[in-house]
Amino acid sequence: MGAYLHNVPMENILYYSLFITTEDENMKKVFVTSVTGAQGNSIAKAFKNANYVVASMTRKEVELSEYETLVGSFNDTAKLASIMKGSEAIIFTLPLLFDTQQVCEITQNIIDGAKEAGVEKIIFNSSFPIGESRTGYAAIDVKHDALDLLNKSGLAVVTLMPTIYLDNLSSPFLLPVINNANIVPYPISENIEFEWISLVNLGLYCVASLQNSSIIGEKILISNLDHCSKHDIAKLIGREKNTEVNYVSSTPAEFEENLIPVLGDYVAKEIANLYRSVSKNNQEFKHYTHHDFINSVDLQTTESWVKSISW
């Protein structure tokens, strides 16, 4: 994941309900997974704003007036294919899950459904830079498992690798700390450089990748691209709060301890492992490719994101 802290209960993983926007039957269509989660929801909004019909699946019906919902299961490939039918692409984000077998089952179901539905393109949101090889951390290695299956599927696959989500800072876990203590605590060392990305921009990159045929088969690092550092984000937040705010690095171990009461031991450990991998593989947060593509996207700035939050 681009380290978004939204928790997805295990029982939600294999059971989904359909969402289809109901505005114009002639609109283009995409299938977006995890639309009730923060990442999938932002992706769905971006496609809706770009005049796409959005279809998705979740465990149960969700009361949203702009969608029609049907209960379904990824175990029912025929029903999954019928939901995907007519889509230009599948936008695939894995749930918060670290078991290889379950990840492979979900990924294979997506592939089989896409093929049966005649959908030829999958945009895989890896949610985090995953590099070229496995790390020994399940949180990253399961994404390699999924990508291996996607690359062997014969479908046209584009992998987008977000850096670190700004929206983590406005999560219920961190926002009160920032507001009350006037610090931005995060488990990335002071000497590690990276650029943030907003969930809004994740959605914009997904839309742009569907419209670009030159990046099929590629893994592309994505961020806000405005060179806003850890300390810059603290200054921007301080400006909005009209007070001094400082970035304070914590350790992954401290981060894990704070997550355990919210997410449980196992999930907290694997999320913390994402940040343990950052210190070992920092180069993966700097290796930008396909500059023509990433520079073509009209992105939300980090400053605009900060202004959108109620600090």
Image: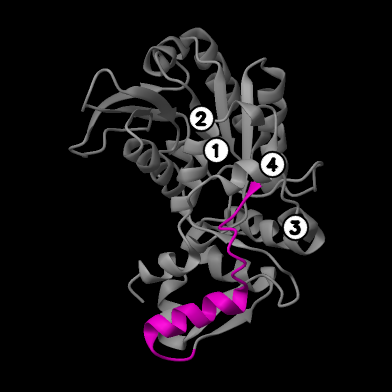
Residue at far bottom of view: 243
The residue labelled by disc 3 is: 277
Which tag is nearer the camera, tag 3 or tag 4? Answer: 4
Q: Quadrant of the C terminus?
A: bottom left
Q: Secondary structure at mark 2?
A: loop
The residue labelled by disc 4 is: 290
Is the C-beta separation of discs 3 and 1 under 8 Å? Answer: no
Q: Reply above or below: 307 against 76.
A: below
Seen from the viewer's position, the closer of residues 176 and 42 is: 42
Q: Amino acid at mark 3?
A: Ser
Residue 206 picture location, percent across and down:
50, 38
Q: Reply above or below: 135 against 146.
A: below
Q: Reply above or below: 229 against 197.
A: below
The residue labelled by disc 2 is: 211
Q: Residue at x 42, y 91 (%)?
A: 243
Q: Amino acid at mark 1?
A: Leu
Neighbours of disc 1 within 10 Å: few (<14), some (14-19), many (20+): many
| Mark sitting earlier along the chain (3/4) | 3
Left or right of 55 on screen, residue 188: right
| Mark sitting earlier along the chain (4/2) | 2
Q: Secondary structure at mark 4?
A: loop
The residues bearing labels 3 and 4 have C-alpha atoms spaced at a distance of 24 Å
Q: Secondary structure at mark 3?
A: helix
| Mark sitting earlier along the chain (2/1) | 1
The residue labelled by disc 1 is: 94
Residue 105 picture location, percent across and down:
59, 24
| Residue 238 forms part of the magenta stretch | yes
The residues bearing labels 4 and 2 have C-alpha atoms spaced at a distance of 14 Å
| Mark sitting earlier along the chain (3/1) | 1
Q: Reply above or below: 28 against 32.
A: above
